[in-house]
Image (cartoon, rainbow, N blue to C red):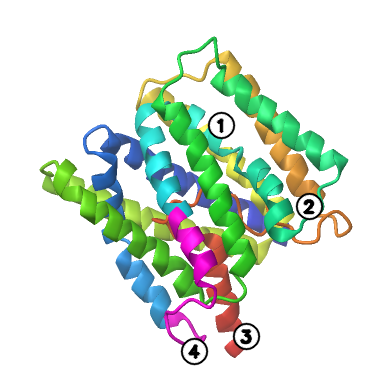
Amino acid sequence: MGSNAKGAVFALIAFAIFSLHDVIVKTMGGVYPTFQLIFFSVMFSFPLALLMLVQDPRPGTLKPVHPGWVALRTGAALVSGVSVFYAFKALPLTQVYAIIFATPLLITILSIPFLGERVRLRRWLAVCAGLVGVIVVVRPGTAELGLGHAAALVGACAGALSAIALRKVGGKERPVVLLLYPLFGNFLVMGAALPFVYQPMLIEHLGLFAAMALLSLLGGLFSIQAYKSGEAVVVAPMQYSQIIWASIFGHFIFREDMDLWTTVGTAIIIGSGIYIVVREGRSDASDNHPVLRTKMRADTGTLLRPSVARQSVNLTKNTE
């Protein structure tokens, strides 16, 4: 098996694991408030953060080199986390994924003012086509829109902003700084809100929260291996395999079926996203490769980010 094929297989496994994580988010979201859900998800993620802290070879403190950008990433991850977790609670899995798949389109737009990226006509056309796909999925004026749709859109926008901030300072900050600040931010903010929304928890549900943290770790590790094995232009589109898992889990677990217009809109979004990835993969088409280097997984500040973890892996390799 070639290196790109291995990378694609590892990525498919990673996104299958992330989909299982999201199934637990949706299941627990039907029982507990969003703030409580995020708080316990983050609490069980701290052992992972400590593991990264121990393995990080770069000397220094946890003080950010660029505090403004780290604060922007932290705030965006907080907003994205609340929005995406609520969207999973309120909408079918397929609709949430379809809207979140617009994140690469938003990253492309934001890369112009923040990264000085040059976006030429073809990528602009792909962005416009993808946004049309979002409109087809949401169908304003014909379908009943609710807070779930707004939350998914806000989550995609905030996730794109967080990805841009990560791309801007990712090579200058310690990976543990980029991981710990969103985790601590979520822990403090959700902890402050917890007394007002807390629902008594069953012991088996604590096990599910621990499973969420474990799945995020496993998904992150497989993502790291995917990007180590294959080219980003091959690995990145594998995220769209989540729509298959969403359809399967949605049908058999939540009794949700993907309607025609969601299917059409999702196909448009995926097609435009793949085009942007392929286009960025050309050396003469992009200066920064913002989509390829942010890996497109929605940033909620509760999960191991493959791009952050890869920095830690690369730093470790450079010191050997």
In the orientation shown, which residue stands out farthest toward the top? 142
Determine which quarter of the picture holds residue 254.
top left
Query: Which residue lies under the disc numbered 4?
Result: 59
Q: Which amino acid, mark 4?
A: Pro
**Residue that carries the numbered disc 3 in the rendered image:** 318
First-in-chain label (3 vs 2)? 2
Spatial distance from mark 1 to mark 4, Cα to Cα?
41 Å
Name the N-terminal-most of marks 4 and 2.
4
Report the residue marked by disc 1. 98
Who comes first in sequence, dot 3 or dot 1? 1
Magenta segment: 55-75
- Distance between the alpha carbons at the discs numbered 3 and 2: 26 Å
Give the distance between the C-alpha atoms of the residues marked 4 and 2, in whole angstroms: 33 Å
Where is residue 317? Give x, y as percent.
60, 82
**Is disc 2 placed on a helix, strand or loop?**
helix
Q: CA distance from mark 4 to mark 3?
A: 14 Å
**Residue 176 visible in the displayed image:** yes
Is 184 contained in the magenta span?
A: no
Q: Amino acid at mark 2?
A: Glu
SS at mark 1? helix
Amino acid, disc 3: Asn
* Image location of residue 183, percent across then percent down: 37, 62
Q: Secondary structure at mark 4?
A: loop
Do the numbered discs 4 and 3 sit on residues whose CB atoms are within 8 Å?
A: no
Checking the image for residue 280, the label placed there is 2
Q: Nearer the viewer, residue 72 or 13?
A: 72
